[in-house]
Image (cartoon, rainbow, N blue to C red):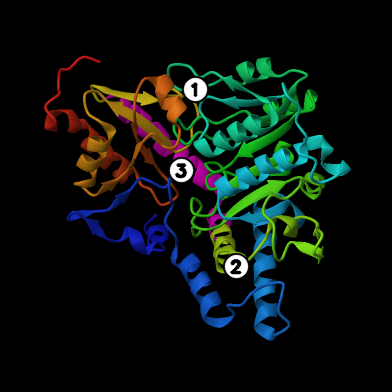
Amino acid sequence: MQRLRADFPLLDQTVNDEPLAYLDSGATAQRPSSVLDAERVFLETINSAVHRGAHTLAGLATEAFEDARATVAGFVGASVDEIVWTANATDALNLVAYGFANATHGRGGAPARRFALRPGDEIVLTEAEHHANLVPWQELAATTGAVLRFVPVDDDGVWSADDLIALLGDRTRIVAFAHVSNVTGQIAEVERLVEAAHAVDALVVLDACQSAPHRPLDLPALGVDFAAFSGHKMLGPTGIGVLYGRAELLDALPPFKTGGSMITTVTLEGSEYLPSPQRFEAGTQPVSQAVALAEAVRYLEAVGLDRIRVHEETLAERLVAGLAAVPGVRVVGPPAGVARSGLASFVVDGVHAHDVGQYLDASGIAVRVGHHCAQPLHRRLGVAATTRASTYLFSTEAEVDRLLDGVAGVRAYFGVEGSER
């Protein structure tokens, strides 16, 4: 662990005169030196526009750009034509939703008709979704007349595969859910849900933002139709995300961002588009970011995704058990003993999450506070906000223990010990 942590320059610092304990990787992970170096070397030596130049640097940049696509494709078991570069995961999910909308409005011709929605068609989501996997579907429903149906969560914020399957029917067209919840750490039964959705001829969209960085992921083997994840949560840079789609679906889905680089022919009257993935990559691309993301993938593969998963799940058990033992603290999500990803969100009775975060920050402990872009879930839980501690491959048991010691002192500091739940 000491050798691994030495790869991450940002971790070697103090915050408020205390050693930094970075427990906010669920929001943005830190980058190892090799990733920082990969982007810098690209920018210093071959930075150039891709797919459009005849000079040497343009050719080298294009090769690096497409090699990065191949690396990321291999990371999730996909082929290169199934990986689309996006600005982030939110952008990727919007790409799919607006592709459905364009198909509904007649764009894309006969191949796109499979995506067209009719009034009364159903989009199945869960109450636990990140806004990025909720708001685009709200917009799609509003413009097509489709109906949103929601899988309920229980008092701990957990939903069941049985409840989702019970909502599926002849009118179900889209099923969208997170592989791993960014609030509760719940891990979805993806393969079972995909089988049930496909049985009613629905397409499955997977939010893989909290799974791709933390556990082995083979998207074709899972059977999902589309999936999205982001670079900055998996040791890579901001400004780049990934959309996975089955090749035959991507080639049929109408694009919603248009312009240069994604066309074959343009006249004053109309345009024709390239096949996937270029048909979705209009304009100047995040080239250095793609190169850096590929290096992040190589780093993760060198460490081993199975090792990372086991390490984080062990830390999660320590987190949940320790938080549950603190009087006046409520942990949301799966109970102790049930598998979850390496994060835990919690409520401290009588103290707002923002105050909890500031108290911990004074001791050099970085956590996330707020509704984590999941307002409906927090509303169902009856709280305005939670505090979330999220671990990664570089997190240690000592950092978890520092967090637990800090949380144990919150209520006394704010003078609310003994208050009722």
- In this figure, which residue is indicated by the disc labeled 2? 287
Direction right: furthest residue: 110
Q: Nearer the viewer, residue 341 or 202?
A: 202
Quarter occupied by residue 397: top left
- C-alpha span from label 2 to label 3: 32 Å
Query: What amino acid is found at the position of numbered circle 1 in the picture?
Result: Val
Q: Residues within 10 Å of mark 1 (few under 14, many from 20)?
A: many
Give the residue at x 35% y 45%: 23
Q: CA distance from mark 1 to mark 2?
A: 39 Å
SS class, disc 3: helix
Q: Position of residue 114 (x, y in %)?
A: 82, 36
Q: Is residue 322 magenta?
A: yes
Who comes first in sequence, dot 1 or dot 3? 1
Looking at the picture, how far across and down is residue 237, in whole percent?
Answer: 49, 60
Q: Nearer the viewer, mark 2 or mark 3?
A: 2
Asked whether disc 2 touches disc 3, contact meaning CB atoms under 8 Å apart, the reply is no
Between circles 1 and 2, the one closer to the viewer is 2
Residue 311, numbered circle: 3
Three-letter amino acid code of the residue under disc 3 = His
Look at mark 1 in the image and give the residue it sits on: 158
Residue shown at 53%/31% (left/top)? 129
Residue in front for this viewpoint, 97 or 1 = 97
Number of the front mark, 1 or 3: 1
Element type where label 2 sits in the image: helix
Residue extent of the magenta highlight: 299-325
Name the one closer to the observer, 390 or 394.
390
